[in-house]
Amino acid sequence: DWTMASYKDDAIAKIRAQVGDKRVICGLSGGVDSSVAAVLIHEAIGDQLTCVFVDHGLMRLNEADEVVSMFRDNYNIPLIHADEADLFIGALEGVSDPEVKRKTIGKLFIDVFQREANKIEGAVFLAQGTLYPDVIESVSFSGGPSVTIKSHHNVGGLPEKMGLKLVEPLRELFKDEVRALGRELGLPEKFIGRHPFPGPGLAIRCPGEITREKLDILRKADAVYIDQIRKHGLYDEIWQAFVAILPVKTVGVMGDGRTYDYACALRAVTSVDGMTADYYPFSHDFLGETATRIINEVKGINRVTYDITSKPPGTIEWE
Ligand code: XMP
């Protein structure tokens, strides 16, 4: 009988056979795939694994701290936290083109990762949370006609450049199987069921120019929105939900004063694979209550809109 428990045992045996007594580096993003890969590899080889978390300062509220404490404190996995918010946000200053944002972040990400990885003496392997769909996609799309809508940043080519061999223990798994494996490894349910989060983070949820002020406002608004979704028991019905802060200020009235603050857009979609998506049909009560909470609780926002665009013609993210 095929069970996730026996899959786990096999995977651990394979990792031990491949790695021997050598050292492994694993890049952690805070996402499910790299986290499951890291915990699995740690079960296999213990402290021969070192994780590197490149923190670009574009994570959601408290997210970076949660990642660090989960891996360091809960699992005792050696973890380098490269806190580079100033570097990334500094480089993004004045940039509003979405592709330039992605390329800027992708390049810095590789620089920082490489710098930190070079400090780990005797590392021979690089671990990645590559899934089966990533493996087939890169085969079936090669040579065919393609239009790049958004260049997703990844660390392709990095292992060769760094002279490292790959460890990819999730290569045979689909997303739902990775989640099952994560449960088998004892990762918290709340973490395993999390919505996907893009590599460039909040940078692409801040259309136009990025500022620290906008990022702070966006983090707070997003936290209120997700809290509302969880409280109403809707989180697991939704593929992805987030707030985008818009590059426009509008006039409002609060108490007996005039306000002039940012507008934001709520986004929530259902989807199977992110390739197509429908907007989520929230009730008007939910939307009204959420708008009121965001405006009352988040200084800097005085107008809330709901994005009812499906994909296509829209994309899920605003950039
Ligand atoms: P779009 O906006 O293209 O998003 O409809 C589809 C899915 O991909 C995610 N996304 C990204 N993920 N780097 C990533 O790692 C990126 O640059 C990027 N852009 C979009 C998006 O969050 C959604 O899940």
Image: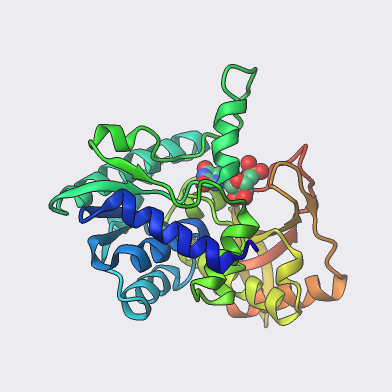
Q: Quadrant of ligand 1?
A: top right
Total numbered labels: 0
Residue 319 percent location from the top left of the image: 59, 42
* Horizontal arrangement in the rendering, residue 63 relative to residue 278 (left or right): left
**Whether residue 51 is situated above or below residue 294 in the rendered picture:** above
Which residue is painted at 64% across and 80% down in the image?
A: 296
Residue 46 percent location from the top left of the image: 28, 68
Residue 168 percent location from the top left of the image: 42, 47
Residue 173 percent location from the top left of the image: 58, 51
**Whether residue 54 is situated above or below residue 295 in the rendered picture:** above
Foreground residue among 197 and 25: 25
Residue 87 at least partly seen: no
* Quarter occupied by residue 42: bottom left
Which residue is painted at 37% across and 68% down in the image?
A: 43
Foreground residue among 289 and 225: 225
Foreground residue among 198 and 156: 156
User: In what quadrant of the picture does the N terminus appear?
Assistant: bottom right
**Whether residue 241 is situated above or below residue 318 in the rendered picture:** below
Colour scheme of the picture: rainbow
Residue 158 at least partly seen: yes
User: Quick one: which residue is furthest to the front in this view?
Assistant: 1
* Horizontal arrangement in the rendering, residue 2 relative to residue 33 (left or right): right
Which residue is painted at 29% across and 32% down in the image?
A: 160
* Horizontal arrangement in the rendering, residue 190 relative to residue 96 (left or right): right
Which residue is painted at 54% across and 47% down in the image?
A: 131
**Whether residue 207 is situated above or below residue 30 in the rendered picture:** above
* Quarter occupied by residue 67: bottom left
